[in-house]
Image (cartoon, helix red, strand yellow):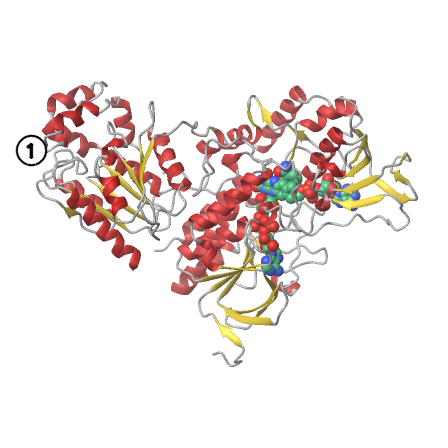
Amino acid sequence: MSSQVLRFADWTSPVPPVRREVLSALPETAEDNPPVLFVPGLGHGAWAFAEHWLGHTASRGFAAHSVSPRANGSLRAYVHDVVQVAAGLPRQAVLVGHGAGALVVAHALARYPARAAVLAAPVPEGWSALGAALRANPLGTLPALIGAAPRLSRKQLFSAELAEADAYRAKLERTPAAIYRQVLFATPPAAPVGDPPTLVVGSPDDRVVPRKALDRTAARFGGAPLLFPGMAHDLMLDTNWREPIDAILDWLTKELAG
Amino acid sequence: MPDTPDIADRHDAVCVIGAGGSGLAAIKNLREQGFAVDCYERETSVGGAWNWRHDRSPVYASTHLISSRPLTEFPDFPMPDDWPDYPHHSKLLSYLERYAQHFGLGDSIWFGTEVVAVTPVGDGRWDVTTRSTGGGAERIQRYAAVVVANGHNWSPKPLPVDTSKYRGQVIHASAYKDPAQLRGRKVLVVGGGNTGCDIAVEAAQQASTVWHSTRRGYWYAPKYVFGRPADQVNDKMLQLRLPLWLRQWIYHRALRLTVGDITRYGLPEPDHRPYESHPVVNSQLVYYLGHGRITPVPDVTRLEGSTVELADGRRVEPDLVITATGYLPRFEFLAPELLDIDDDGKPDLHLHAFARKHPTLAVIGLVQPDAGLFPLAHWQSVAVARWLRLRATDPVRAAAVQQRESTRPLRSWTRLRVVPSSRHWFEVSHTSYLRTLEDLLKQLEPA
Ligand SMILES: Cc1cc2nc3c(=O)[nH]c(=O)nc-3n(C[C@H](O)[C@H](O)[C@H](O)COP(=O)(O)OP(=O)(O)OC[C@H]3O[C@@H](n4cnc5c(N)ncnc54)[C@H](O)[C@@H]3O)c2cc1C
Ligand SMILES: NC(=O)c1ccc[n+]([C@@H]2O[C@H](COP(=O)([O-])OP(=O)(O)OC[C@H]3O[C@@H](n4cnc5c(N)ncnc54)[C@H](OP(=O)(O)O)[C@@H]3O)[C@@H](O)[C@H]2O)c1
């Protein structure tokens, strides 16, 4: 594990700044709640949260933001961008990562003391993610093994009854396999700083993240996953999007009170 | 056991003295370890040295960082990445204000409140006497621990030369704020630290005549080498773990090739090797020497009438003498033996942070690193917070850690080979120092 204290990479070759895409929805009345920063997974952009979750979060009294992964990024750059946006918010932020974005958040938690963290349908590190992807979508995943950009299929991400599925899929950007490798096979993140309360949510019917992986990730943060049966991987875009975000915000409200 | 009715017992709370960068990091990191914190700050806002509104702030209008942004920011709260490599002091203040706001530290700070006495009451607990700077009665409160973060760049070091018979104006650098103070005047700047060099450069741009008095030769490092901030290049060498002698050789060569031979301008040859004195980082000083705008002169020996006499017998007649002689650490609220302060006023602390005989007394920010201070202040305060936590929860393990720390060799965390000048006793290499802290932090990790 690289040192958390001696950060030579940052000291000798800092991540170059870029103009980041951040979408936001603000509550109508200023409330004393921490801001929530949503971090999409690979292939997705901030738009995926702007669709439903940002507005809903704002309507429940939390400032909601989402940052897109930068073009030509790297795991290090994604983590950097999340921490930059979080530290730029007026108050200690809650980080919510989805899919591979949950891995980015896990790395960001080692560098920024979040007020709380939520890992939604968190893609597990290493081989188990690849195994699950191969089972669910062999044709889309196989190219990744020889270095081409993998293609996520409609049925991996969305449930069958989602009318907008094709429109959403058209918005996905293909991410080079090298980036997937970097994110999935990075040295596991160091422990979160500041010991934030952490919640794992997911679906037993997710075809990207196996149920066992959800349990493992949740166990690492000392809990059990909160499950939403019947939902597909892209919880925030699914027909049932309201249920998980409400559960997340209920949990958050309880944690903040405690 | 509050036997004295007028002492308010704050039980397990920790008292932090000062809300500059070090104090803010201490509040945040103590609170993260679950401590209640009361911070006392004699000024009316946060920022310490970087708050130019404060009378005691040492910054002048043109102050920019000398340590580059990535080596200066707190490790868990980066500065915006679109800020320049070397931000202006006003940005540093806004950074510290945002840090305080982001982590809601204001709730823990009592502004306009000066700590006037800190006394041990046995049991490792402390009575802290405070006084409102607006006047009013003193107040005593009892704390489980005291973390001192009072800064060491606010009490001017006097120039030990009699000025009573001098008719010109003499001010310490701390009273220099604005270039208008120099405009059209004949100025003598004394001192070759970063302040002295910055002010000499400003005088070169504003004053009619400038003399710069230094009592030894220095290595004047440029802010950029090979197109990168110099400290970032230096850290590349440290990352590769090049031995000191090799780094000294490279440093020497790089300066020779870029800055050149400074004795050509009449400056003395450095009387020490690179890394043996606090780094001077200034790209413009040599430039103005080369343009004849700054005349280098040796030490000041006498001030009388309208003349200043110099060590080589020369006499000059400035209108204004600015003594950039540096600052002295001061701990008037503590009996000297609590920090093992010697006759020269130097505390003797483990890692320049932990009082040797008082496990619940620590100082944050009392180091002079060859990089930004805040990363060190951050990890120091994490270590202090974890230490206090471990002491409360697992005294047996805490004792074992203390035992092991007592055998840690000095040379692993402080520079031993330094220029014998009163200012270098707390000079540290940021990498050696942080390695040591990292090792301590591992020992202090909750089981
Ligand atoms: C001109 C100049 C430029 C510098 N440039 C750099 C740089 O480029 N990079 C870098 O890292 N560092 C630089 N420094 C060092 C600078 O001192 C530190 O960055 C930093 O400000 C130190 O923070 P601190 O909190 O330890 O002390 P301070 O900022 O001095 O804060 C101490 C606080 O304690 C308060 N206080 C003191 N005594 C009491 C008391 N008895 N009761 C209540 N409150 C009290 C003070 O009011 C003050 O607010 C520079 C210093 C100077 C003078
Ligand atoms: N731009 C910036 O970011 C910036 C600017 C200014 C200061 N700083 C920082 O602030 C701190 C204080 O710096 P500083 O320059 O004010 O003080 P300093 O580093 O203590 O330097 C004081 C200078 O005055 C000289 N001096 C001291 N007493 C003297 C005497 N009696 N007669 C003649 N010369 C004497 C010293 O000489 P010796 O070499 O013999 O000790 C030294 O050159 C340092 O950490 C510095 O890095 C940063």
Up-down: is A90 above or below A163? below
Q: Is residue A151 above or below residue B109?
A: above
Instruction: State ligand 2's quadrant.
Output: top right
Is B298 drawn above or below residue B407 in the view shown? above
In the rendered structure, the residue with mark 1 lies on which chain? A
Give percent across and percent down for residue B374: 52, 44
Q: Callout 1: helix, strand or loop?
A: loop
Where on the picture, by quarter, is residue A173?
top left
Horizontal side of A246 relative to A136 (left or right) equals: right
Along the line of sight, which residue is nearer the eye, B274 or A238? Answer: A238
Locate residue B95 relative to residue B270 in the image: left or right. Answer: left
- Is A92 displayed left or right of A206 in the figure? right
In which quarter of the view is residue A44 placed? top left
Q: Nearer the viewer, residue B91 or A232?
A: B91
Beta carbon at label 1 within 8 Å of ligand 1: no
Crowd rating for badge 1 (residues with CA inside 10 Å; few <14, some 14–19, many 20+): few
* Disc 1 target residue: A161
Amino acid under label 1?
Glu
Note whether B299 is above or below A182 in the view shown.
Answer: below
- Between A141 and A197, the one lying in front of the other is A197
The answer to whether residue B28 is visible is yes
Give coordinates of residue A86: x percent, y percent: 37, 41
As drawn, the residue found furthest toward the right would be: B305
User: In which quarter of the view is residue B428 placed?
Assistant: top right
* Relative to A122, A9 lies left or right: right
The reply to whether residue B437 is visible in this rendering is: no
Residue at far left of view: A161
Q: Position of residue B87 (x, y in %)?
A: 56, 35
**Quadrant of the snapshot with the N terminus of chain A:** top left
